[in-house]
Image: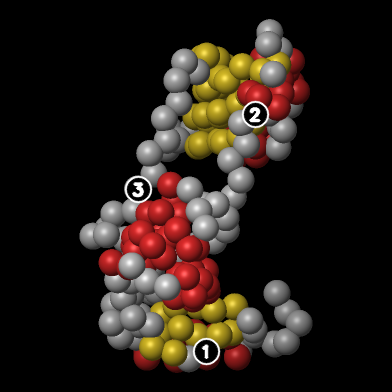
């Protein structure tokens, strides 16, 4: 267990650069932030251990690969069917993102073969749970991710509170969890040791 400092401005600058371009070389990040490449590597490793960075992803231009058109699909679902419809849409290989709204609608961003939206939606509609759907052509897409220093922080794995200077990390079966205090650390280790080996 190691004391975990607050994320500082260097951490936030590294995160901003990675959000803008996850393939950016460590040497370039080091030049931009004013530290050495090994320091960048160490900080990124620590951010991954803390769960701040979960994975690096590849952004694929589906329209180039599939020669399709970009659309937004809004689906109005029957009560109780929202999660299933969202999952069905998410598993269609033409769908890149799905969103579920608080009022039970599902939105999907997809690249579909020209004049083939009905064929993409047909299996989902036939499975039931869909009241109606609306398809809109995407004219322009802008993605402007940001990491705001004041609103950014790691939450405690036990109580969900933001972790400050008293924060600690706990290594449980090769999984690193972040906690905000000694009390939460003790609670986490006690609950972990209470689970018999091999049980889920």
Number of marks in the rendered image: 3
The residues tagged by marks 1 and 3 sit, at their Cα atoms, a distance apart of 34 Å
Residue 143: quadrant of the picture: top left
**Tag 1's secondary structure?**
helix
Q: Nearer the viewer, residue 26 or 172?
A: 26
In the rendered view, tell whether residue 153 sits above or below residue 189: above
Label 2: few (<14), some or many (≥20) within 10 Å?
some
Residue 199: quadrant of the picture: bottom right
**Pointer 3 and pointer 2: residues touching (CB < 8 Å)?**
no
The residues tagged by marks 3 and 2 sit, at their Cα atoms, a distance apart of 24 Å
Q: Nearer the viewer, residue 123 or 114?
A: 114
Residue in the picture at 63% in, 23% down: 63
Horizontal relation, residue 130 to residue 177: left or right: right
Label 3: few (<14), some or many (≥20) within 10 Å?
few
Residue in the picture at 50% in, 18% down: 138
Residue at the disc numbered 3: 146
**Pointer 2 and pointer 1: residues touching (CB < 8 Å)?**
no
Considering every residue shown, the one lying at the far top of the view is 115
The residues tagged by marks 2 and 1 sit, at their Cα atoms, a distance apart of 45 Å
The image shows residue 200 at horizontal and vertical percentages of 70, 74
Residue 115: quadrant of the picture: top right
Residue in the picture at 52% in, 91% down: 190
Considering every residue shown, the one lying at the far left of the view is 150
Residue at the disc numbered 1: 189
Label 1: few (<14), some or many (≥20) within 10 Å?
few
**Tag 3's secondary structure?**
loop
Residue at the disc numbered 2: 62
Horizontal relation, residue 79 to residue 129: left or right: left
In the rendered view, tell whether residue 183 sits above or below residue 80: below
The image shows residue 11 at horizontal and vertical percentages of 36, 67
Upstream in sequence: badge 1 or badge 3: 3
Q: Nearer the viewer, residue 7 or 89?
A: 7
């Amino acid at each position: 267990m190691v004391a975990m400092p607050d994320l500082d401005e260097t951490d936030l600058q590294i995160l901003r650069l990675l959000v803008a371009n996850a393939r950016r070389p460590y040497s370039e990040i080091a030049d931009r932030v004013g530290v050495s490449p090994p320091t960048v590597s160490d900080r990124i490793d620590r951010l991954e251990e803390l769960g701040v960075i979960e994975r690096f992803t590849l952004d694929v231009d589906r329209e180039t690969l599939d020669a399709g058109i970009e659309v937004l699909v809004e689906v109005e679902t029957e009560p109780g069917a929202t999660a299933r419809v969202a999952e069905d849409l998410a598993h269609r290989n033409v769908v890149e993102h799905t969103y579920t709204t608080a009022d039970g609608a599902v939105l999907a961003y997809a690249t579909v073969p020209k004049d083939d939206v009905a064929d993409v939606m047909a299996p989902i509609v036939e499975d039931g749970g869909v009241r109606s759907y609306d398809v809109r052509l995407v004219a322009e897409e802008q993605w402007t991710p940001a990491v705001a220093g004041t609103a950014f922080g790691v939450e405690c794995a036990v109580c969900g509170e933001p972790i400050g200077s008293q924060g600690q990390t706990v290594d449980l079966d090769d999984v690193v969890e972040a906690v905000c205090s000694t009390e939460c650390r003790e609670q986490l280790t006690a609950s972990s040791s209470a689970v018999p080996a091999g049980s889920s």
